[in-house]
Image (spheres, rainbow, N blue to C red):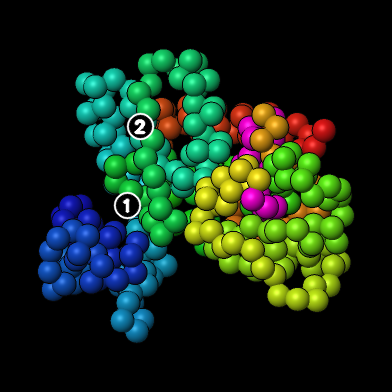
C-alpha cells in the first residue's frame, strides 16, 4: 500500500483540481504535493493526473481512486467527529441563510426538539457567498443555483418559485389587487434588483409602459418584513412564508408564479451521521406536509 501522505495529497489535488489549492488545504508546499503525487504514480506505475492549463485533472484510473479516497477520508472524519460528540451527547450544527432560518426553520424547530430531545441543536447563519460545506457545520441550508460540490449531497427542499404577496392592511388600503394589471399600479418591493418583478409581469402577459419603481432591499428578510408592514407587494416563495400566510400576516394575490434559477437545498457531507439523517428526514416530512396545503384560501 502506498504511503498515507501520498494518498492524502493526491486526493486533495484531484478533488480541488489544483496542486496549489491542495497545498493550501493541507498546509504544505506546492513541491511537497507534486512530490507525493509523483511518489504515488511511481508506486502504481501509472499516471494519476494530467496538467490542464494551471490546474490538473485526474486520469480515469486516478478519478476512481480519488472518489474512493474522498469517501473514505470523509467516513473517517465523520466517525472521529461521532466519537468526540458521543462524549458530549448528540449535537447538530445547522447553518442556514437568514431568510430560511427566520421564515421556515425556527418556527418549526420546537417540533423537532420535542420529538428528539436527545439532540442538541445549534443554528448559525450561512451567508450566500459560502459555497462549500463549513467544517463547523453538519448541515447547510441555502438557495443555490450552481452545481453541488463533489464532496456534498444536496437534497431539494423546494423551488424558489415566487408569487405576489402583501399584507391584509395593504389590500384594505389599495382595494382589489386580483389582476396583474392592478398589481402593476401599486408600490412594489424588490429583493436585490427589479429583474424578478419584470420577469413576473412578462409571465403574466403584462407589457410595462414605464420602468419599474419601488424600494430595493438587500435581502429577502428585509423585503418580506417590509411587505408584512404594509409597504408594498413582494414576490416571495410561498413555501418560505407559509407561517406568515397561516397567521394572516401575508396574503397571496395571484397564482401566477415566476421561477428563478435556483432551489432551496439541504446540503450535508457524502457520508452523513445518523443525527444528520434524522434531521434531514424530519425536514423532508415537514416539506411534504406543507406541500399538501393550499397557498390561498
285 with respect to 170 (left or right): left
Residue 111 colored magenta?
A: no
> Looking at the image, is 73 positioned above or below residue 7?
above
**Mark 2 Cα within 10 Å, few/some/many (few <14, many 20+)?**
few
Residue 12, located in which quarter of the rendered image? bottom left
Image quarter where the C terminus lies is: top right
- Residue 187 can be seen in this image: yes
**Mark 1 Cα within 10 Å, few/some/many (few <14, many 20+)?**
some
278 with respect to 58 (left or right): right
- Of the pair 269 and 227, the residue shown nearer to us: 227
Q: What x and y, as percent, mark residue 10? A: 25, 62
- Which region of the structure is painted magenta? 231-246
Residue 197, located in which quarter of the rendered image? bottom right
- Tag 1 secondary structure: helix
Residue 244 colored magenta?
A: yes
Residue drawn at the location 19% of the way across and 66% of the way down:
23
234 with respect to 52 (left or right): right
Q: How many marks?
A: 2
| Comes first in the chain, label 1 or label 2 | 1
Residue drawn at the location 67% of the way across and 29% of the way down:
247
- Tag 1 residue: 69
- Tag 2 residue: 122
- Residue 156 can be seen in this image: no
> Looking at the image, is 157 positioned above or below residue 279?
below
- Tag 2 secondary structure: strand
Q: What x and y, as percent, mark residue 152? A: 43, 50
Residue drawn at the location 79% of the way across and 62% of the way down:
185
7 with respect to 235 (left or right): left
Residue 85, disc: none
Q: What x and y, as percent, mark residue 36? A: 17, 65
The residues bearing labels 1 and 2 have C-alpha atoms spaced at a distance of 30 Å
- Of the pair 244 and 281, the residue shown nearer to us: 244
Amino acid at each position: 500500500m502506498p504511503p498515507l501522505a501520498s494518498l492524502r495529497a493526491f486526493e486533495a489535488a484531484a478533488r480541488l483540481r489544483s496542486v496549489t489549492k491542495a497545498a493550501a488545504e493541507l498546509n504544505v508546499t506546492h513541491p511537497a504535493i507534486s512530490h507525493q503525487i509523483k511518489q504515488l504514480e511511481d508506486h502504481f506505475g501509472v499516471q494519476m493526473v494530467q496538467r490542464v492549463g494551471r490546474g490538473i485533472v485526474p486520469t480515469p484510473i486516478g478519478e476512481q481512486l480519488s472518489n474512493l479516497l474522498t469517501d473514505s477520508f470523509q467516513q473517517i472524519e465523520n466517525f472521529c467527529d461521532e466519537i468526540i460528540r458521543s462524549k458530549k451527547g448528540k449535537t447538530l450544527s445547522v447553518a442556514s441563510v437568514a431568510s430560511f432560518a427566520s421564515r421556515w426553520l425556527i418556527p418549526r424547530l420546537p417540533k423537532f426538539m420535542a420529538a428528539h430531545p436527545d439532540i442538541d441543536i445549534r443554528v448559525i447563519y450561512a451567508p450566500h457567498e459560502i459555497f462549500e460545506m463549513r467544517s463547523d457545520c453538519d448541515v447547510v441550508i441555502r438557495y443555490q443555483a450552481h452545481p453541488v460540490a463533489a464532496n456534498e449531497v444536496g437534497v431539494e427542499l423546494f423551488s424558489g418559485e415566487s408569487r405576489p404577496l402583501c399584507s391584509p392592511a395593504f389590500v384594505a388600503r389599495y382595494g382589489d389587487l386580483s389582476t396583474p394589471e392592478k398589481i402593476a399600479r401599486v408600490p412594489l418591493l424588490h429583493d436585490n434588483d427589479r429583474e424578478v418583478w419584470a420577469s413576473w409581469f412578462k409571465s403574466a402577459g403584462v407589457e410595462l409602459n414605464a420602468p419599474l419603481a419601488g424600494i430595493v432591499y438587500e435581502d429577502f428578510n428585509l423585503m418580506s418584513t417590509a411587505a408584512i408592514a404594509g409597504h408594498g407587494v413582494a414576490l416571495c416563495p410561498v413555501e418560505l412564508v407559509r407561517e406568515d400566510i397561516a397567521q394572516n400576516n401575508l396574503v397571496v394575490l395571484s397564482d401566477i408564479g415566476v421561477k428563478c434559477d435556483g432551489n432551496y437545498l439541504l446540503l450535508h457531507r457524502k457520508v452523513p451521521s445518523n443525527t444528520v439523517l434524522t434531521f434531514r428526514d424530519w425536514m423532508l416530512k415537514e416539506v411534504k406536509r406543507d406541500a399538501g396545503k393550499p397557498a390561498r384560501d
